[in-house]
């Protein structure tokens, strides 16, 4: 009977360990920009085009598979969505956001895998990776920014009031 809890604990550890071993490239749209990370380490994206219509180039160490069109929901507006073209070139994605009725109702996070190969360095073996695409809700300014804006508005009102009285 004592073997059963140990077996369950070992099985849970094996699943947790295997989940951590899958290399992951995550590309995120949030606050009108795209960011990327590979296993939690920031990756530099070279962005071209207007906001909500980006072409993003990854570093040369990444080689995307031609996965085609991926639809994501828009968290701020359920009637809109995103279309992400993955692997039109080996290091390129095209991300179009805020499209009416495209991607509506789709989840705003998708996990695609395998999605390509990452080559860590010269002479090293390429490793397959999964790709997570996500459109996260916009974040509000932090409390410090809100206080500064409120203080600026109060100062402006006092100044206008003094000017009008003269």
Image (cartoon, grey):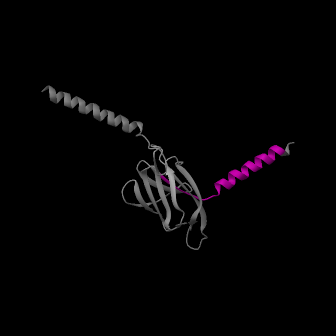
User: At 29% across and 35% down in the image, what residue appears?
Assistant: 152
User: At 80% across and 48% down in the image, what residue appears?
Assistant: 7
User: At 85% across and 46% down in the image, what residue appears?
Assistant: 3
Q: Position of residue 78 (x, y in %)?
A: 47, 43
Quarter that holds the C terminus: top left
**Observer-nearest of 102 and 40:** 102
Q: Position of residue 53 (x, y in %)?
A: 40, 56
For the view shown, which residue lies furthest in the bottom direction? 123
Residue 149 on the magenta span: no
Query: Quadrant of the rendered structure where residue 158 is?
Result: top left
Q: Position of residue 154 (x, y in %)?
A: 28, 31
Q: Position of residue 32 (x, y in %)?
A: 40, 50
Magenta residues, start to end: 4-28
For the view shown, which residue lies furthest in the left direction? 166
Q: Is residue 123 above or below residue 81?
A: below
Quarter that holds the N terminus: top right
Q: Is residue 115 above or below residue 77?
A: below
For the view shown, which residue lies furthest in the front direction? 101
Q: Main secondary structure of the magenta part?
A: helix
For the view shown, which residue lies furthest in the top direction? 165
Q: Is residue 128 left or right of residue 3?
A: left
Q: Is residue 154 above or below residue 106?
A: above
User: At 39% across and 37% down in the image, what residue appears?
Assistant: 144
Count of numbered marks: 0
């Amino acid at each position: 009977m004592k073997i059963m809890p140990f077996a369950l604990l070992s099985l849970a550890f094996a699943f947790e360990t295997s989940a951590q071993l899958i290399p992951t490239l995550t590309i995120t749209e949030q606050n009108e920009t795209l960011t990327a990370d590979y296993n939690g380490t920031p990756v530099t994206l070279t962005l071209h085009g207007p906001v909500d219509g980006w072409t993003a180039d990854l570093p040369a160490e990444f080689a995307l598979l031609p996965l085609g069109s991926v639809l994501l929901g828009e968290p701020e507006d359920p009637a809109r969505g995103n279309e992400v073209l993955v692997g039109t070139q080996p290091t390129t994605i095209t991300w179009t956001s805020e499209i009416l009725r495209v991607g509506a109702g789709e989840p705003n996070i998708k996990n695609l895998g395998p999605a390509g190969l990452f080559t860590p360095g010269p002479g090293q073996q390429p490793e397959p990776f999964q790709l997570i695409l996500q459109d996260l809700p916009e974040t509000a300014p932090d409390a410090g920014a809100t206080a500064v804006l409120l203080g600026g508005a109060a100062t402006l009102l006092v100044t206008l009031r003094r000017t009008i009285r003269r």
